[in-house]
Amino acid sequence: MPFSDRLVFDEALIRRFDVNGPRYTSYPTADRFVSDFGADAYRERLARRRDDPRDRKPFSLYFHLPFCSAICYYCACNKIVTGDHGRSAKYLKYLGKEIALQTAFLAPDDDAVEQLHWGGGTPTFMSRDEMRRLMGMIRRHFRLLDDGEYSIEVDPRKVDRATVDLLAELGFNRISVGVQDFDTRVQRAVNRVQSEEETFAVIDAARANGFKSISVDLIYGLPKQSAAGFERTLDRVLAAGPDRLSIYNYAHLPALFKPQRRILDADLPTPDERLRILALAIGKLTAAAYVFIGMDHFAKPDDELAVAQRAGRLHRNFQGYSTHSDRDMLSFGISSIGKLGASYSQNVKTLEDYYARLDDGVLPVFRGIELTPDDRLRRAVIGSLMCHFALPFAAFEKEYGIDFTRYFSLELAELGEMERAGLLRVEPDRVVVLPPGRMLARVIAMVFDARLRADRTRNRYSKVI
């Protein structure tokens, strides 16, 4: 059956099934990583790839650049707010050490890269010379393929035309532009005042430089936000015609993220208003012919994400949705998460630990996990739900040597309530997520999360919607 990108916003279903749950950028999720998987285990994984070239594919690389010159109160990222731009120079030096340390365990010819992402923090906190230096270090150790995806997150308040010109010169061909909301009341409430003019200047500069994809990030549920105000933001953004749009749900967790304590609960929109904002956004994007990719991501029909989804080639990793299949991801910098074979790893979260370990010549991995055969199967099942809204039993049976209905008998039985509610349909040979259930794919995926089943504590996660 051909893939359909139809989406239905059903407020009653969302209210009924809106629970706390993981975002499933990985399975098992990062909160399941263990300290037993440290630098030694990661080094062994690198050596295993070096010694067995049969399944080698080009790498995906991630660089976490944590510095910001100002704090956005809603932010839950691992960042360092500072006015001292000299701190990034020291950080670059240690990124160079980590690159050299990781690549020392790889085969000399194992250097191809088809995906690169700089995230943060604010990557453009770095000076132009520092950005050149970092890309130079990357290119000394890796070979960036001509048809690869090379992306960067930017804060338009810190980027001008010359900076975008430089990003293109360095090889970036995709850009993610943070907006959140153009309503000045909202901007002041979250300490991120950003004009439309400087935002659209960045988008125009990216287009002039031939960037293949321009993405805009918005957030709903912020303080002082209203449906009327967000509609004006949407109209302005849609007029600019970005290739991709992300409409993130603000997760207010002040107990976990200190900056959020500056946001007053009384200023947050009511649950009803949040749903009005979300319904408005979906209606506007659908009317503008954007395709629902999954969770909070939309793209134009001819964008690579939409094309990959229709072709069954969409994938999900720590960078979100991706057109590339499941690749080994080498990650660099504090708190960054990587993937090698059937394992995940995460670096230490503070500069002090990061610098100390690298000074000792030790990989800065402090936790991770080795996947069991069951983990790998469930990772594939959850990925299929998140990317393709379907579970074709035969594909999993062929790949993993199981009888799907027998292996997942408990899970299929649990889907009964969701089937009766109209979220999905269980057929003899597959599960299909129906248009009203697509926004709730995370909830459906949770049924197949064995580790969540064993630990029903979900307060660590944000709401699905």
Image: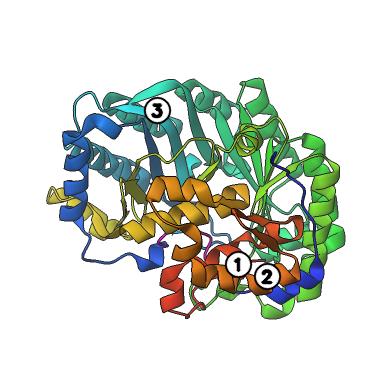
Of the residues under marks 3 and 1, which one precedes in the sequence?
3
Task: Check residue 418 in the rendering and tell me which mark sits there, or answer none.
Answer: 2
Picture coordinates of residue 275 (x, y %)?
Answer: 78, 67
* Label 3 element class: helix
Cα–Cα span, label 2 and label 1: 10 Å
Q: Residues within 10 Å of mark 3 (few under 14, many from 20)?
A: some
**Callout 3 touching callout 1 (CB < 8 Å):** no
The tag on residue 132 is 3
- Residue type at mark 3 is Arg
Camera sees residue 20: no
Q: Are marks 2 and 1 in contact (CB under 8 Å)?
A: yes
- State the CA–CA distance, disc 3 to disc 2: 51 Å
Can you identify the residue that label 1 sits on? 443
Nearer the observer, 191 or 35: 35
Q: Mark 2 or 1 closer to N-term?
A: 2
Amino acid marked by disc 1: Val
